[in-house]
Amino acid sequence: MMKMTRWLLLILLTLFQDSFVRLGTLLGLAAGYGSLQVIGGEPWINMSAYGFIGWGVGAYLGHHRSGKTPESRPPKLKVHQGGR
């Protein structure tokens, strides 16, 4: 039982390590809960579907924004033209 709990905790921490992913998942869960009055259906199904969509959007935004940080930009190429 302890090994399974540790495995589940490791997966959860791996999936939700980015702030964009956490925020997207929470917004997706909230949207799924709010859609119960509009769409209807089962609460668990709506919340899990919208939470998964929010997780995907958060993962995309986190990956897209990570390439824009100053540390990950390639250095500017400096060409030495000789001379004095």
Image (tube, rainbow, N blue to C red):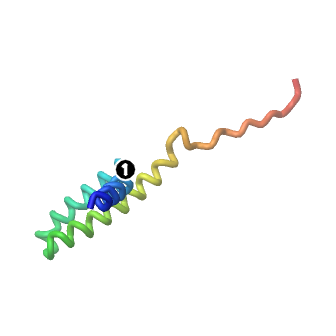
Name the amino acid, label 1: Gln
Give the side of residue 38 with respect to residue 61, left or right.
left
Q: Position of residue 73 (x, y in %)?
A: 58, 43
- Category of crowding for the residue at label 1, using alpha-carbon neighbours closer than 10 angstroms: few (below 14), some (14–19), many (at least 20): few
Q: Is residue 18 above or below residue 83?
A: below
| Residue at image point 28% right, 57% down | 2
| Residue at image point 24% right, 67% down | 48
Residue 50: quarter of image = bottom left
Residue at the far left: name it: 37
Q: Position of residue 61 (x, y in %)?
A: 41, 54
Element at badge 1? loop
| Residue at numbered disc 1 | 17
Tell which of 62 and 3 is nearer to you. 3
Quadrant containing the N terminus in the rendered view? bottom left
Give the side of residue 61 with respect to residue 53, left or right.
right
Residue 41: quarter of image = bottom left
| Residue at image point 46% right, 54% down | 63
| Residue at image point 15% right, 70% down | 43
Q: Position of residue 62 (x, y in %)?
A: 42, 52
Tell which of 68 and 55 is nearer to you. 55
